[in-house]
Amino acid sequence: MIVEKIQENGQDNTEDGRRRLKQGADDLEFRKSGKQRKVGKVDNSDQGCLKAPDVVHVALVNGRGGTRGGRAIPHGVFELSRASHMLSSAPRNMNEEYDAIVLGTGLKECILSGMLSVSGKKVLHVDRNKYYGGESASITPLEDLLAKFKAPPPDESYGRGRDWNVDLIPKFLMANGMLVKLLIHTGVTRFLIWVQNMQEDKRETWDGFDPFNNSMSALYNKFNLDKNTQDFTGHALALYRDDDYISQRAITTIRRIKLYSDSLARYGKSPYLYPMYGLGELPQGFARLSAIYGGTYMLDKPIDEIVVKDGKVVGVRSGDEVAHCKQVFCDPTYVPDRVQKVGQVIRCICLLDHPIPGTGDALSTQIIIPQKQVNRNSDIYVSLVSHTHQVAAKGWFIAMVSTTVETKNPEIEIKPGLDLLGPIRQKFISVTDYMEPTDDGLNSQVFISTSYDATTHFETTCLDVLDIFKRATGEEFDFQKVKQDLGEEDQ
Protein backbone atom coordinates (compact mmCIF):
# COMPACT_ATOMS: atom_id res chain seq x y z
CA MET A 1 0.00 0.00 0.00
CA ILE A 2 1.37 3.40 -1.00
CA VAL A 3 1.17 6.29 1.44
CA GLU A 4 1.48 9.92 0.43
CA LYS A 5 1.30 12.84 2.77
CA ILE A 6 0.15 15.77 0.71
CA GLN A 7 0.68 18.58 3.16
CA GLU A 8 1.57 19.15 6.78
CA ASN A 9 -1.13 20.07 9.24
CA GLY A 10 -1.47 23.69 10.15
CA GLN A 11 -3.30 26.90 9.49
CA ASP A 12 -2.39 29.85 7.35
CA ASN A 13 -4.33 32.97 8.23
CA THR A 14 -2.21 35.18 6.02
CA GLU A 15 -3.51 37.08 3.02
CA ASP A 16 -1.94 34.43 0.79
CA GLY A 17 -3.75 31.71 2.70
CA ARG A 18 -7.05 33.49 2.29
CA ARG A 19 -6.36 34.03 -1.40
CA ARG A 20 -5.66 30.34 -1.94
CA LEU A 21 -8.75 29.44 0.07
CA LYS A 22 -10.85 31.65 -2.19
CA GLN A 23 -9.30 30.07 -5.27
CA GLY A 24 -10.06 26.61 -3.90
CA ALA A 25 -13.66 27.61 -3.30
CA ASP A 26 -14.23 29.05 -6.77
CA ASP A 27 -15.64 25.82 -8.19
CA LEU A 28 -18.83 26.10 -6.20
CA GLU A 29 -19.29 29.09 -3.92
CA PHE A 30 -22.53 30.88 -3.19
CA ARG A 31 -22.66 34.65 -3.30
CA LYS A 32 -25.38 37.24 -3.08
CA SER A 33 -25.96 39.79 -5.83
CA GLY A 34 -28.92 42.05 -5.36
CA LYS A 35 -32.09 40.04 -4.92
CA GLN A 36 -30.77 36.84 -6.43
CA ARG A 37 -28.24 34.50 -4.95
CA LYS A 38 -25.63 33.58 -7.51
CA VAL A 39 -23.50 30.53 -7.93
CA GLY A 40 -19.79 30.87 -8.44
CA LYS A 41 -17.77 29.29 -11.22
CA VAL A 42 -18.51 25.72 -12.18
CA ASP A 43 -15.68 23.62 -13.60
CA ASN A 44 -15.60 24.44 -17.30
CA SER A 45 -13.25 21.73 -18.47
CA ASP A 46 -14.43 19.39 -21.18
CA GLN A 47 -13.69 16.31 -19.13
CA GLY A 48 -16.41 16.18 -16.49
CA CYS A 49 -18.91 18.04 -14.41
CA LEU A 50 -16.92 17.62 -11.20
CA LYS A 51 -13.33 16.96 -12.01
CA ALA A 52 -12.40 14.18 -9.63
CA PRO A 53 -10.30 11.82 -11.69
CA ASP A 54 -7.64 10.54 -9.41
CA VAL A 55 -6.88 8.82 -6.15
CA VAL A 56 -3.71 7.45 -4.62
CA HIS A 57 -3.75 4.57 -2.19
CA VAL A 58 -3.50 7.02 0.68
CA ALA A 59 -3.88 10.74 0.15
CA LEU A 60 -4.32 13.30 2.90
CA VAL A 61 -6.63 16.25 2.51
CA ASN A 62 -5.78 18.98 4.91
CA GLY A 63 -3.26 21.62 5.69
CA ARG A 64 -3.07 25.34 5.29
CA GLY A 65 -6.11 27.47 4.83
CA GLY A 66 -7.72 30.72 5.78
CA THR A 67 -10.43 31.86 8.11
CA ARG A 68 -14.14 32.45 7.88
CA GLY A 69 -16.23 33.96 10.60
CA GLY A 70 -13.37 33.75 13.06
CA ARG A 71 -12.71 30.03 12.55
CA ALA A 72 -9.92 28.41 10.61
CA ILE A 73 -10.68 26.62 7.36
CA PRO A 74 -8.03 24.21 6.02
CA HIS A 75 -6.74 24.58 2.50
CA GLY A 76 -8.19 21.95 0.22
CA VAL A 77 -11.64 22.42 1.74
CA PHE A 78 -14.29 24.69 0.30
CA GLU A 79 -17.36 25.98 2.05
CA LEU A 80 -20.92 26.56 0.94
CA SER A 81 -22.67 29.11 3.11
CA ARG A 82 -25.43 27.08 4.77
CA ALA A 83 -27.72 30.05 5.20
CA SER A 84 -27.48 31.26 1.64
CA HIS A 85 -28.57 28.36 -0.47
CA MET A 86 -31.70 26.82 1.01
CA LEU A 87 -34.29 26.70 -1.74
CA SER A 88 -37.93 27.21 -0.95
CA SER A 89 -40.29 24.25 -1.11
CA ALA A 90 -43.45 26.33 -0.93
CA PRO A 91 -46.56 24.65 -2.40
CA ARG A 92 -47.01 25.34 -6.08
CA ASN A 93 -49.32 24.03 -8.77
CA MET A 94 -47.40 21.67 -11.07
CA ASN A 95 -49.98 21.62 -13.91
CA GLU A 96 -47.60 23.07 -16.47
CA GLU A 97 -45.52 21.80 -19.37
CA TYR A 98 -41.78 21.31 -19.08
CA ASP A 99 -38.96 20.12 -21.29
CA ALA A 100 -37.72 17.85 -18.52
CA ILE A 101 -38.81 16.69 -15.09
CA VAL A 102 -36.14 15.48 -12.66
CA LEU A 103 -37.23 13.19 -9.81
CA GLY A 104 -35.09 13.02 -6.70
CA THR A 105 -32.44 15.42 -5.41
CA GLY A 106 -29.49 13.07 -5.15
CA LEU A 107 -26.22 14.49 -6.39
CA LYS A 108 -26.54 12.96 -9.88
CA GLU A 109 -30.05 14.31 -10.35
CA CYS A 110 -29.10 17.79 -9.13
CA ILE A 111 -26.12 17.91 -11.48
CA LEU A 112 -28.34 16.87 -14.38
CA SER A 113 -30.93 19.46 -13.41
CA GLY A 114 -28.29 22.18 -13.48
CA MET A 115 -26.86 20.99 -16.80
CA LEU A 116 -30.28 20.85 -18.45
CA SER A 117 -31.23 24.31 -17.18
CA VAL A 118 -27.94 25.81 -18.32
CA SER A 119 -28.61 24.27 -21.75
CA GLY A 120 -31.85 26.20 -22.02
CA LYS A 121 -34.34 23.52 -20.95
CA LYS A 122 -37.40 24.32 -18.86
CA VAL A 123 -36.91 22.03 -15.86
CA LEU A 124 -39.16 20.95 -12.99
CA HIS A 125 -37.25 19.25 -10.17
CA VAL A 126 -39.31 17.30 -7.64
CA ASP A 127 -38.44 15.29 -4.53
CA ARG A 128 -40.84 13.34 -2.35
CA ASN A 129 -38.59 14.05 0.64
CA LYS A 130 -38.47 17.26 2.64
CA TYR A 131 -34.71 17.51 2.26
CA TYR A 132 -32.06 17.53 -0.47
CA GLY A 133 -29.57 14.78 -1.15
CA GLY A 134 -31.41 11.47 -1.34
CA GLU A 135 -28.86 8.69 -0.91
CA SER A 136 -26.06 11.27 -0.96
CA ALA A 137 -27.45 13.29 1.96
CA SER A 138 -25.52 14.25 5.08
CA ILE A 139 -27.25 13.39 8.36
CA THR A 140 -27.36 15.90 11.19
CA PRO A 141 -27.56 15.98 14.19
CA LEU A 142 -25.68 12.91 15.42
CA GLU A 143 -28.79 11.72 17.24
CA ASP A 144 -30.52 11.24 13.88
CA LEU A 145 -27.67 9.06 12.59
CA LEU A 146 -27.80 6.80 15.64
CA ALA A 147 -31.58 6.62 15.44
CA LYS A 148 -31.34 5.62 11.76
CA PHE A 149 -29.21 2.63 12.73
CA LYS A 150 -31.28 1.93 15.89
CA ALA A 151 -28.36 2.72 18.22
CA PRO A 152 -28.63 4.30 21.70
CA PRO A 153 -28.36 8.12 21.91
CA PRO A 154 -24.78 9.45 22.10
CA ASP A 155 -23.26 10.32 25.47
CA GLU A 156 -21.56 13.62 26.33
CA SER A 157 -18.18 12.49 25.01
CA TYR A 158 -19.45 12.93 21.43
CA GLY A 159 -19.94 16.68 21.91
CA ARG A 160 -22.91 18.57 20.53
CA GLY A 161 -25.07 16.54 18.20
CA ARG A 162 -25.58 19.47 15.83
CA ASP A 163 -21.82 19.63 15.19
CA TRP A 164 -22.03 16.37 13.27
CA ASN A 165 -22.82 16.11 9.54
CA VAL A 166 -22.28 12.50 8.48
CA ASP A 167 -22.21 11.63 4.77
CA LEU A 168 -24.10 8.47 3.89
CA ILE A 169 -21.97 8.11 0.74
CA PRO A 170 -18.76 10.13 1.22
CA LYS A 171 -16.61 10.99 -1.79
CA PHE A 172 -13.70 13.37 -2.41
CA LEU A 173 -13.36 15.85 -5.27
CA MET A 174 -10.00 15.63 -6.99
CA ALA A 175 -8.22 18.90 -7.67
CA ASN A 176 -4.47 18.66 -7.42
CA GLY A 177 -1.58 16.72 -5.92
CA MET A 178 2.12 16.12 -5.37
CA LEU A 179 1.95 12.52 -6.49
CA VAL A 180 4.51 13.20 -9.21
CA LYS A 181 7.22 13.00 -6.54
CA LEU A 182 6.00 9.56 -5.63
CA LEU A 183 5.77 8.43 -9.23
CA ILE A 184 9.40 9.32 -9.86
CA HIS A 185 10.38 6.67 -7.32
CA THR A 186 8.19 3.92 -8.80
CA GLY A 187 10.04 3.59 -12.11
CA VAL A 188 7.17 4.87 -14.23
CA THR A 189 8.65 8.23 -15.15
CA ARG A 190 9.41 7.31 -18.77
CA PHE A 191 5.96 5.79 -19.16
CA LEU A 192 4.21 8.89 -17.75
CA ILE A 193 6.28 11.24 -19.90
CA TRP A 194 5.20 9.24 -22.96
CA VAL A 195 1.55 9.40 -21.87
CA GLN A 196 1.74 13.14 -21.25
CA ASN A 197 3.42 13.85 -24.59
CA MET A 198 1.24 11.52 -26.66
CA GLN A 199 -1.26 13.44 -28.81
CA GLU A 200 -4.07 11.47 -30.39
CA ASP A 201 -4.01 13.44 -33.66
CA LYS A 202 -0.21 13.39 -34.07
CA ARG A 203 1.12 9.93 -34.89
CA GLU A 204 4.71 11.14 -34.60
CA THR A 205 4.18 11.42 -30.82
CA TRP A 206 3.18 7.75 -30.51
CA ASP A 207 6.76 6.44 -30.55
CA GLY A 208 5.80 3.41 -32.64
CA PHE A 209 2.90 2.35 -30.40
CA ASP A 210 -0.66 2.61 -31.75
CA PRO A 211 -2.90 3.19 -28.68
CA PHE A 212 -6.08 2.72 -30.72
CA ASN A 213 -5.24 -0.79 -31.94
CA ASN A 214 -3.13 -2.14 -29.06
CA SER A 215 -4.15 -3.15 -25.55
CA MET A 216 -3.07 -1.62 -22.27
CA SER A 217 -1.21 -4.86 -21.57
CA ALA A 218 0.94 -4.21 -24.65
CA LEU A 219 1.69 -0.68 -23.45
CA TYR A 220 2.74 -1.95 -20.01
CA ASN A 221 5.03 -4.45 -21.72
CA LYS A 222 6.52 -1.73 -23.92
CA PHE A 223 7.75 0.08 -20.81
CA ASN A 224 8.47 -3.09 -18.78
CA LEU A 225 6.21 -2.10 -15.90
CA ASP A 226 5.95 -4.73 -13.16
CA LYS A 227 2.65 -5.97 -11.70
CA ASN A 228 2.76 -3.66 -8.67
CA THR A 229 3.33 -0.61 -10.85
CA GLN A 230 0.51 -1.75 -13.15
CA ASP A 231 -1.75 -2.03 -10.09
CA PHE A 232 -0.82 1.48 -9.05
CA THR A 233 -1.32 2.94 -12.52
CA GLY A 234 -4.64 1.24 -13.20
CA HIS A 235 -6.26 1.70 -9.80
CA ALA A 236 -4.69 4.85 -8.35
CA LEU A 237 -4.27 6.94 -11.51
CA ALA A 238 -6.83 5.64 -13.98
CA LEU A 239 -9.28 4.70 -11.18
CA TYR A 240 -10.35 1.36 -12.56
CA ARG A 241 -12.15 -0.90 -10.10
CA ASP A 242 -10.97 -4.16 -11.67
CA ASP A 243 -8.38 -5.35 -14.20
CA ASP A 244 -10.65 -5.75 -17.23
CA TYR A 245 -9.11 -2.61 -18.72
CA ILE A 246 -5.77 -4.36 -19.29
CA SER A 247 -7.14 -6.27 -22.29
CA GLN A 248 -8.94 -3.23 -23.72
CA ARG A 249 -7.67 -0.46 -26.01
CA ALA A 250 -4.86 1.51 -24.42
CA ILE A 251 -6.26 4.88 -25.51
CA THR A 252 -9.04 4.75 -22.91
CA THR A 253 -6.59 4.34 -20.03
CA ILE A 254 -4.27 6.95 -21.50
CA ARG A 255 -7.11 9.46 -21.47
CA ARG A 256 -7.81 8.66 -17.84
CA ILE A 257 -4.18 9.16 -16.86
CA LYS A 258 -4.08 12.43 -18.80
CA LEU A 259 -7.15 13.53 -16.86
CA TYR A 260 -5.19 12.79 -13.71
CA SER A 261 -2.24 14.91 -14.81
CA ASP A 262 -4.59 17.74 -15.84
CA SER A 263 -5.86 17.85 -12.27
CA LEU A 264 -2.40 18.47 -10.85
CA ALA A 265 -1.06 21.92 -9.95
CA ARG A 266 -4.43 23.34 -9.12
CA TYR A 267 -5.19 24.38 -5.52
CA GLY A 268 -2.03 24.54 -3.46
CA LYS A 269 -0.61 21.18 -2.42
CA SER A 270 -3.66 19.11 -1.58
CA PRO A 271 -5.11 17.07 -4.46
CA TYR A 272 -8.60 16.89 -3.01
CA LEU A 273 -11.49 19.21 -2.30
CA TYR A 274 -14.19 18.48 0.25
CA PRO A 275 -17.16 20.73 1.08
CA MET A 276 -17.56 22.08 4.58
CA TYR A 277 -20.54 20.49 6.36
CA GLY A 278 -20.34 17.37 4.19
CA LEU A 279 -21.32 16.28 0.70
CA GLY A 280 -24.99 16.95 1.37
CA GLU A 281 -24.15 20.56 0.49
CA LEU A 282 -23.27 19.68 -3.12
CA PRO A 283 -26.74 18.69 -4.36
CA GLN A 284 -28.08 22.01 -3.10
CA GLY A 285 -25.28 23.80 -4.94
CA PHE A 286 -26.34 22.34 -8.27
CA ALA A 287 -29.97 22.91 -7.37
CA ARG A 288 -29.14 26.59 -6.95
CA LEU A 289 -27.42 26.59 -10.35
CA SER A 290 -30.56 25.16 -11.93
CA ALA A 291 -32.72 27.75 -10.17
CA ILE A 292 -30.57 30.59 -11.51
CA TYR A 293 -31.28 29.35 -15.02
CA GLY A 294 -35.03 29.12 -14.42
CA GLY A 295 -35.46 25.66 -12.91
CA THR A 296 -38.48 25.08 -10.63
CA TYR A 297 -38.09 23.09 -7.41
CA MET A 298 -40.67 21.27 -5.29
CA LEU A 299 -39.73 19.37 -2.14
CA ASP A 300 -42.06 17.12 -0.13
CA LYS A 301 -44.05 16.38 -3.29
CA PRO A 302 -45.23 12.76 -3.62
CA ILE A 303 -44.87 11.13 -7.03
CA ASP A 304 -47.75 8.77 -7.79
CA GLU A 305 -47.14 7.94 -11.43
CA ILE A 306 -44.87 8.48 -14.40
CA VAL A 307 -47.40 8.93 -17.18
CA VAL A 308 -46.55 7.07 -20.40
CA LYS A 309 -48.44 7.18 -23.71
CA ASP A 310 -47.59 4.94 -26.67
CA GLY A 311 -44.37 3.90 -24.95
CA LYS A 312 -43.09 7.45 -24.36
CA VAL A 313 -43.24 9.52 -21.19
CA VAL A 314 -45.68 12.45 -21.34
CA GLY A 315 -45.76 13.60 -17.74
CA VAL A 316 -45.60 12.98 -14.01
CA ARG A 317 -48.63 12.76 -11.71
CA SER A 318 -48.81 13.85 -8.08
CA GLY A 319 -52.31 13.42 -6.71
CA ASP A 320 -54.68 15.20 -9.08
CA GLU A 321 -51.93 17.28 -10.64
CA VAL A 322 -50.07 16.31 -13.81
CA ALA A 323 -46.92 18.05 -15.01
CA HIS A 324 -46.43 17.39 -18.72
CA CYS A 325 -42.96 16.87 -20.15
CA LYS A 326 -40.89 15.43 -22.96
CA GLN A 327 -38.31 13.68 -20.74
CA VAL A 328 -37.95 12.37 -17.19
CA PHE A 329 -34.70 11.93 -15.28
CA CYS A 330 -34.67 10.02 -11.99
CA ASP A 331 -32.84 7.72 -9.61
CA PRO A 332 -33.69 3.99 -9.46
CA THR A 333 -36.01 4.32 -6.44
CA TYR A 334 -38.62 6.16 -8.51
CA VAL A 335 -38.92 3.42 -11.16
CA PRO A 336 -38.44 -0.02 -9.57
CA ASP A 337 -40.00 -1.65 -12.65
CA ARG A 338 -37.36 -0.17 -14.97
CA VAL A 339 -34.19 -1.17 -13.07
CA GLN A 340 -32.42 -4.39 -12.18
CA LYS A 341 -30.15 -5.43 -9.33
CA VAL A 342 -26.63 -6.18 -10.55
CA GLY A 343 -24.80 -6.33 -7.23
CA GLN A 344 -24.51 -4.93 -3.72
CA VAL A 345 -22.33 -2.40 -1.92
CA ILE A 346 -21.36 -2.57 1.75
CA ARG A 347 -20.56 0.65 3.61
CA CYS A 348 -19.43 0.97 7.21
CA ILE A 349 -19.55 4.39 8.91
CA CYS A 350 -17.05 4.47 11.79
CA LEU A 351 -16.84 7.10 14.53
CA LEU A 352 -13.28 7.54 15.80
CA ASP A 353 -11.72 9.73 18.48
CA HIS A 354 -8.31 9.61 16.77
CA PRO A 355 -6.81 9.86 13.27
CA ILE A 356 -5.91 6.72 11.32
CA PRO A 357 -2.65 5.28 12.72
CA GLY A 358 0.38 5.59 10.50
CA THR A 359 -0.85 8.65 8.58
CA GLY A 360 1.02 11.30 10.55
CA ASP A 361 -2.10 12.38 12.49
CA ALA A 362 -3.72 13.51 9.25
CA LEU A 363 -7.11 15.14 9.68
CA SER A 364 -8.38 13.64 6.44
CA THR A 365 -7.28 10.62 4.47
CA GLN A 366 -8.24 8.48 1.52
CA ILE A 367 -7.10 4.90 1.01
CA ILE A 368 -7.56 2.45 -1.84
CA ILE A 369 -6.61 -1.18 -1.22
CA PRO A 370 -6.13 -2.75 -4.68
CA GLN A 371 -8.01 -5.99 -5.26
CA LYS A 372 -4.94 -8.16 -5.76
CA GLN A 373 -3.45 -7.18 -2.40
CA VAL A 374 -6.40 -8.80 -0.62
CA ASN A 375 -7.24 -11.57 -3.13
CA ARG A 376 -10.47 -9.94 -4.30
CA ASN A 377 -12.08 -8.96 -7.58
CA SER A 378 -12.74 -5.36 -6.51
CA ASP A 379 -10.92 -2.70 -4.49
CA ILE A 380 -11.64 -1.70 -0.89
CA TYR A 381 -12.06 2.04 -0.23
CA VAL A 382 -11.43 3.94 2.99
CA SER A 383 -12.05 7.65 3.60
CA LEU A 384 -11.61 9.82 6.67
CA VAL A 385 -12.83 13.33 7.45
CA SER A 386 -12.91 15.20 10.74
CA HIS A 387 -13.98 18.20 12.78
CA THR A 388 -11.78 20.30 10.49
CA HIS A 389 -14.45 19.94 7.80
CA GLN A 390 -17.29 20.86 10.18
CA VAL A 391 -18.68 17.32 10.02
CA ALA A 392 -17.88 16.19 13.57
CA ALA A 393 -17.39 17.58 17.05
CA LYS A 394 -13.88 18.75 17.90
CA GLY A 395 -11.45 15.87 18.29
CA TRP A 396 -13.66 13.42 16.40
CA PHE A 397 -13.26 11.69 13.04
CA ILE A 398 -15.63 9.94 10.62
CA ALA A 399 -14.30 7.04 8.59
CA MET A 400 -16.07 5.10 5.86
CA VAL A 401 -15.01 1.68 4.59
CA SER A 402 -16.75 0.38 1.47
CA THR A 403 -16.49 -2.22 -1.24
CA THR A 404 -18.51 -4.21 -3.75
CA VAL A 405 -20.01 -7.30 -2.11
CA GLU A 406 -18.57 -10.58 -3.42
CA THR A 407 -19.57 -13.15 -0.76
CA LYS A 408 -22.41 -13.99 1.61
CA ASN A 409 -20.49 -12.37 4.49
CA PRO A 410 -19.92 -8.74 3.42
CA GLU A 411 -18.63 -7.55 6.81
CA ILE A 412 -15.67 -9.92 6.58
CA GLU A 413 -14.86 -8.44 3.15
CA ILE A 414 -14.21 -4.95 4.59
CA LYS A 415 -12.07 -6.22 7.47
CA PRO A 416 -8.76 -5.22 5.78
CA GLY A 417 -10.05 -1.64 5.68
CA LEU A 418 -11.42 -1.69 9.23
CA ASP A 419 -8.11 -3.06 10.53
CA LEU A 420 -6.36 0.10 9.33
CA LEU A 421 -8.53 2.40 11.47
CA GLY A 422 -7.40 1.44 14.97
CA PRO A 423 -9.95 1.48 17.83
CA ILE A 424 -13.50 2.24 16.63
CA ARG A 425 -15.94 3.89 19.06
CA GLN A 426 -19.03 3.05 17.01
CA LYS A 427 -19.69 1.59 13.60
CA PHE A 428 -22.81 1.42 11.45
CA ILE A 429 -23.01 -1.07 8.60
CA SER A 430 -25.36 -0.93 5.63
CA VAL A 431 -25.62 -3.20 2.58
CA THR A 432 -27.47 -1.69 -0.37
CA ASP A 433 -28.44 -3.04 -3.76
CA TYR A 434 -26.62 -1.65 -6.77
CA MET A 435 -29.24 -0.95 -9.42
CA GLU A 436 -28.92 -0.22 -13.12
CA PRO A 437 -31.60 0.73 -15.68
CA THR A 438 -32.85 -2.07 -17.91
CA ASP A 439 -32.60 0.08 -21.05
CA ASP A 440 -30.95 3.27 -22.28
CA GLY A 441 -34.13 5.36 -22.11
CA LEU A 442 -34.06 6.40 -25.77
CA ASN A 443 -37.46 4.88 -26.57
CA SER A 444 -39.34 5.87 -23.41
CA GLN A 445 -37.36 9.08 -22.78
CA VAL A 446 -37.10 8.03 -19.13
CA PHE A 447 -33.41 8.34 -18.19
CA ILE A 448 -32.35 6.60 -14.98
CA SER A 449 -29.10 6.97 -13.08
CA THR A 450 -27.29 4.00 -11.59
CA SER A 451 -26.91 3.54 -7.85
CA TYR A 452 -23.80 4.94 -6.16
CA ASP A 453 -20.87 2.53 -6.22
CA ALA A 454 -18.31 1.78 -3.51
CA THR A 455 -15.68 4.27 -4.69
CA THR A 456 -14.66 7.28 -2.61
CA HIS A 457 -14.19 9.57 -5.61
CA PHE A 458 -16.52 11.19 -8.14
CA GLU A 459 -15.16 9.66 -11.34
CA THR A 460 -17.94 7.11 -11.89
CA THR A 461 -20.59 9.57 -10.71
CA CYS A 462 -19.53 12.10 -13.33
CA LEU A 463 -19.28 9.50 -16.08
CA ASP A 464 -22.85 8.37 -15.40
CA VAL A 465 -24.16 11.95 -15.42
CA LEU A 466 -22.37 12.85 -18.65
CA ASP A 467 -23.54 9.65 -20.32
CA ILE A 468 -27.18 10.33 -19.37
CA PHE A 469 -26.94 13.91 -20.61
CA LYS A 470 -25.51 12.82 -23.97
CA ARG A 471 -28.14 10.10 -24.43
CA ALA A 472 -30.95 12.51 -23.61
CA THR A 473 -29.78 15.49 -25.67
CA GLY A 474 -27.66 13.86 -28.35
CA GLU A 475 -24.73 16.13 -27.58
CA GLU A 476 -21.89 16.63 -25.13
CA PHE A 477 -22.45 19.20 -22.39
CA ASP A 478 -20.81 22.55 -23.17
CA PHE A 479 -19.19 23.72 -19.94
CA GLN A 480 -18.39 27.07 -21.52
CA LYS A 481 -22.08 27.98 -21.29
CA VAL A 482 -21.82 28.38 -17.54
CA LYS A 483 -18.71 30.56 -17.77
CA GLN A 484 -20.12 32.73 -20.54
CA ASP A 485 -23.59 33.19 -19.11
CA LEU A 486 -22.61 34.01 -15.54
CA GLY A 487 -21.42 37.55 -15.04
CA GLU A 488 -17.77 38.21 -14.29
CA GLU A 489 -18.58 38.90 -10.65
CA ASP A 490 -20.13 35.48 -10.25
CA GLN A 491 -17.55 33.33 -12.04
Image: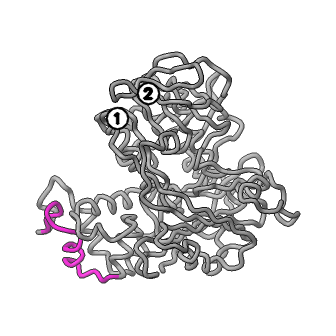
Q: Is residue 3 left or right of residue 357?
A: left
Q: At which x and y percent is residue 275?
A: 61, 51
- Checking the image for residue 472, the label placed there is 1
Report the residue at 54% width, 62% height from top.
270
User: Which residue type carries mark 2?
Assistant: Ala
In the image, residue 214 lies in the stretch drawn in magenta: yes
* SS at circle 1: helix
Q: Residue furthest right?
A: 156
Q: On screen, 93 above or below 16?
A: above
User: Which residue type carries mark 1?
Assistant: Ala
- Checking the image for residue 100, the label placed there is 2
Label 1 environment density (alpha carbons within 10 Å; few <14, some 14–19, many ≥20)? some
Quadrant housing residue 121: top left
Q: Is residue 423 left or right of residue 441?
A: right
Most foreground residue, 14 or 330: 330
Q: On screen, 31 above or below 206?
A: above
Most foreground residue, 306 or 271: 306
Question: What are the residue bounds of the magenta stretch?
Answer: 209-227
